[in-house]
Image (cartoon, grey):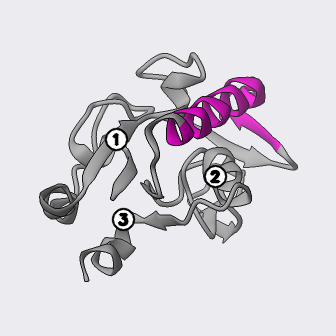
Amino acid sequence: MRILVSACLLGCRCRYDGASKKHPLVKRLAERHTLVPVCPEQLGGLPTPRPPAERQNGRVMTREGSDVTEQYRRGAEETLRLCGLLGCEAAVLKERSPSCGRGEIYDGSFSGRLTAGSGVAAELLSAHGIPVYGESRVEELLR
């Protein structure tokens, strides 16, 4: 199976802070499946590093107050396009991200509080029938 994977989970330094969030189970996933690394935020034209952003009232805003919603939408659309072009059947995305989070994201107050919701790319992929998993659910794909 081909699976989209947040590039930061593979060790790529593409997160907003220029770091990665390499996840040990993702390497095991690569032993069984073909992984396609993506960073929707970079695909949307945002630099690395970049100011932290969170979803607020249907928009994506940086801590400094800049609206980056269009870059997030563009990145989500490019992620969906790659998913279709490469025949990906699922996605493993970084939890809590305003782009990749699924089911729970930061609440937009930049206080570390979580709320129900999904990131822009996760939401778009799900709307198109692509199952989206967070890194804490990788074991489900390994079974």
Mark count: 3
Amino acid type indicated by mark 1: Val
The stretch of residues the image draws in magenta is: 59-84
Find disc 2 in the rendering and name its residue.
Answer: 125
Q: Which mark is residue 36?
A: 1
Quarter holding the N terminus is bottom left
The answer to which of 104 and 79 lies nearer the viewer is 79
SS under mark 2: helix
In this rendering, the label closer to the viewer, 3 or 1: 1
Name the main secondary structure of what is drawn in magenta. Answer: helix
Horizontally, residue 53 falls left or right of residue 128, namely: left
Q: Position of residue 2 (x, y in %)?
A: 35, 52
Amino acid type indicated by mark 2: Leu
Q: Earlier in the sequence, mark 2 or mark 3?
A: 2
The answer to which of 111 and 57 lies nearer the viewer is 57
Residue drawn at x 14%, y 63% as measured from the top left? 28
Q: Residues within 10 Å of mark 2 (few under 14, many from 20)?
A: many
Q: Are marks 3 and 1 in contact (CB under 8 Å)?
A: no
Q: Position of residue 85 (x, y in %)?
A: 51, 34
Q: Earlier in the sequence, mark 2 or mark 1?
A: 1
SS under mark 3: helix
Q: Say above or below: 39 vs 142.
A: above
Q: Residues within 10 Å of mark 3 (few under 14, many from 20)?
A: many
Residue drawn at x 58%, y 59% as measured from the top left? 130
Mark 3 and mark 1: span between their CA atoms?
A: 15 Å
SS under mark 1: strand
Q: Earlier in the sequence, mark 3 or mark 1?
A: 1
Find disc 3 in the rendering and name its residue.
Answer: 135
Q: Position of residue 48 (x, y in %)?
A: 42, 20
Amino acid type indicated by mark 3: Glu
Residue reaching furthest to the right:
57
Q: Are marks 2 and 1 in contact (CB under 8 Å)?
A: no
